[in-house]
């Protein structure tokens, strides 16, 4: 009997509704992008001069959420000295240099051109995200099938190396990012999309039938077949451009941390492997080969980004733990998960326990489970939670590609997050035979502080990430855009960043205090260090930085509905509430005796 498959439909994570306005700067190759964005995105295209290279003078950058820049490859290739005996550079000069010593010098001049152009956006990238599109790379080594691949003589390698230079230059900008358009072209297929099969490599654009010489081409003695017919150009060009437009919006969602997911909770049977492992007689490798191993790999990538993993399974605990080790081998370990709940309680109660362990709100959680009844029971209790259930062949794509599960950059704190949270859980579950005071003292907590005073500071990126992703201990809940930080620092504001370690774990950045003049405008604290008074030590250092004893220091608390843990923070630390949500103090809070201050 044939299987009645459901209609194909991808699962989505939902919720996103933010509108964006973009400035798209570049030549004709990016013009079509303007029409590929969703209807709620406003995009304005600005042409740019090639020589001398200068930004369009009529752009009011302040009105845009992001600036998209596409440098033109032919301008990079031709604006160089001649290395082949001519009077000046040429965009096909590389072909005359194949096998000659001048190729390396030619590449360095092209790289210098890229650096010059990227640097012209430095002032803009302080306040607005600047998203650079890479150059379209040749589809193959046109020097020859058997020619060496990893050499500058290969035009594909030459342009890839220019893209590497572009990425390095862009990464030096405060708010500089790169999107690789070659991923889009590869995804839809280069044949029928890219024009390098009949145009010179420097053009680096999409196939089209009409060019500058179209009228002359149509008056030839023998009329040629147009490129679109010869090379099967189709809707794939539009598909590739739409893909790029989607990635640009994804980038802005990642930068602005919209609907971010911090924790993935997974079922085991028919989720991490095929079928019910306890009832299967098939070899273990057959139950994990293919999509299960692909999902495991995707989950580990999410973990490397700083995300957390947890298990929620209805099963016998000890035998299931043993089966997990048998099934997954060295691919995954239970230590990759911050919380493991294997029992026969309802999944909603186990997820409640997991949320308590890791201090994450339901709206920042993705639950993956094959059973629709379990999913419905969980959603009934936690309607904000996101879910993947039916389309198991699509789970890997969502975990890898969805912007909600991505980050701008992977930091050292990201790589240690699972270890840090596991240590926090261990601390909370410590043997109660000793007093809490004795136990906290035994942790040997050490704390140090760094003052961040500009977006160019080494610790700014980590501080802004913590401020914008923290919900529970966040005194105002304000989310800061790039231009907000620029204005804050320009007005003399500083961010006091607190770092800590103890004998169990290196915690990294755990808190931040934003100070403007004599006002503490926002305090955030990582949930993984709740209960150790590190926030009191941070407040003490912050007030010393303000010189609190001279005149009163003001502070603000706003009820966001999610930040109950910090409503009484200032009251507990010698502040008086002078009006609703506004506090004032001239006194330094006591420094916790169990915390050692490092310089």
Image: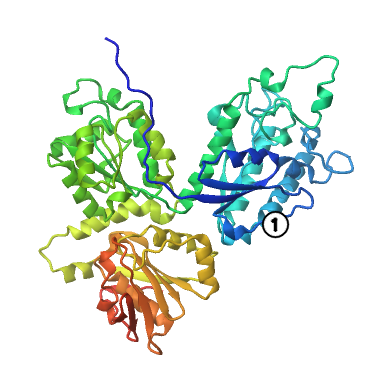
| Residue that sits furthest to the left in the current view | 433
Quadrant in which the N terminus appears: top left
Q: Is residue 38 left or right of residue 223?
A: left
Count of marks placed on residues: 1
- Which quarter of the image is occupied by the C terminus? bottom left
Q: Residue at x 56, y 39 (%)?
A: 244
Q: Which percent across, then down, holds residue 25?
A: 66, 48
Using the image, determine if residue 88 lies above or below residue 482. above
Q: Which residue is mark 1?
A: 58
Estimate the x, y position of residue 422 in percent, counting from the top left: 26, 53
- Residue at left offset 54%, top offset 41%: 37
Q: Where residue 82 sits: x, y (%)? A: 84, 43
As drawn, 157 above or below 432: above
For the residue pair 16 and 351, the one nearer the viewer reads as 16
Q: Is residue 459 left or right of residue 167?
A: left
Q: Which of 216/288 is in front?
A: 216
What colouring style does the render use?
Answer: rainbow
Q: Residue at x 65, y 41 (%)?
A: 30
Residue 136: image quadrant is top right
Toward which corner of the image does residue 510 lie, by quadrant?
bottom left
């Amino acid at each position: 009997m044939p299987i009645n498959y459901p209609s194909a439909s991808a699962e989505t994570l939902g919720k996103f509704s933010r509108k964006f306005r973009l400035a798209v700067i570049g030549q004709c190759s990016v013009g079509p992008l303007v029409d590929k964005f969703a209807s709620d995105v406003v995009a304005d295209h600005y042409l740019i001069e090639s020589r001398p290279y200068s930004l369009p003078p009529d752009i009011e950058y302040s009105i845009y959420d992001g600036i998209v820049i596409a440098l033109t490859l032919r301008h990079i290739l031709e604006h160089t000295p001649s290395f082949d005996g001519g009077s000046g550079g040429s965009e096909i000069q590389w072909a005359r240099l194949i096998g000659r010593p001048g190729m390396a010098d030619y590449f360095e001049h092209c790289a210098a051109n890229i650096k010059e152009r990227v640097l012209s956006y430095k002032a803009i990238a302080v306040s607005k995200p600047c998203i650079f599109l890479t150059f379209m790379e040749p589809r193959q080594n046109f020097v020859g099938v058997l020619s060496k691949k990893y050499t500058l003589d290969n035009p594909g390698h030459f342009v890839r190396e220019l893209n590497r230079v572009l990425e390095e230059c862009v990464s030096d900008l405060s708010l500089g990012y790169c999107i690789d358009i070659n991923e889009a072209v590869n995804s839809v297929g280069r044949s029928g999309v890219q024009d390098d099969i009949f145009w010179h490599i420097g053009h680096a654009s999409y196939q089209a039938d009409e060019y500058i010489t179209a009228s002359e081409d149509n008056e030839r003695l023998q009329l040629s077949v147009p490129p679109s017919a010869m090379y099967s150009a189709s809707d794939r060009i539009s598909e590739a451009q739409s893909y790029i437009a989607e990635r640009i919006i994804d980038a802005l969602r990642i930068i602005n941390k919209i609907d971010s997911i911090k924790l993935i909770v997974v079922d085991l049977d028919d989720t991490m492997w095929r079928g019910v492992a306890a009832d299967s007689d098939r070899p273990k490798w057959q139950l994990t080969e293919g999509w299960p191993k692909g999902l495991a790999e995707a989950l580990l990538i999410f973990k490397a980004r700083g995300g957390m993993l947890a298990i929620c399974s209805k099963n016998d605990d000890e035998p299931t733990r043993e089966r997990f080790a048998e099934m997954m081998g060295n691919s995954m370990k239970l230590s990759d998960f911050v919380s493991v709940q294997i029992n026969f309680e309802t999944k909603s109660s186990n997820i409640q326990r997991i949320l308590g362990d890791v201090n994450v709100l339901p709206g920042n959680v993705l639950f993956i489970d094959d059973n629709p009844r379990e999913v419905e029971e969980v959603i009934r209790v936690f309607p904000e939670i996101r879910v993947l259930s039916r389309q198991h062949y699509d789970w890997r794509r969502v975990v890898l590609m969805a912007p909600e599960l991505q980050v701008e950059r992977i930091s050292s704190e990201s790589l240690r997050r699972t270890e840090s949270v596991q240590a926090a859980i261990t601390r909370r579950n410590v043997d109660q035979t000793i007093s809490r005071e004795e136990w906290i003292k035994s942790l040997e907590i050490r704390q140090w502080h760094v003052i961040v005073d500009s977006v160019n500071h080494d610790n700014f990126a980590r501080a802004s990430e913590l401020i914008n992703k923290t919900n529970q201990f966040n005194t105002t809940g304000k989310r800061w855009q790039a231009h907000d930080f620029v204005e804050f620092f320009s007005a003399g504001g500083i961010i006091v960043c607190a770092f800590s370690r103890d004998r169990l774990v290196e915690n990294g950045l755990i808190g931040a205090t934003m100070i403007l003049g004599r006002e503490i405008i926002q305090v955030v604290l990582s949930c993984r260090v709740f209960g150790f008074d590190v926030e009191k030590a941070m407040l003490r250092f912050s007030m010393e930085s303000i010189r609190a004893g001279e005149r009163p220091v003001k502070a603000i608390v706003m009820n966001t509905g999610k930040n109950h843990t910090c409503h009484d923070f200032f009251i507990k630390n010698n502040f008086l509430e002078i009006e609703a949500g506004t506090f004032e103090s001239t006194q330094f809070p006591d420094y916790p005796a169990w915390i050692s201050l490092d310089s």
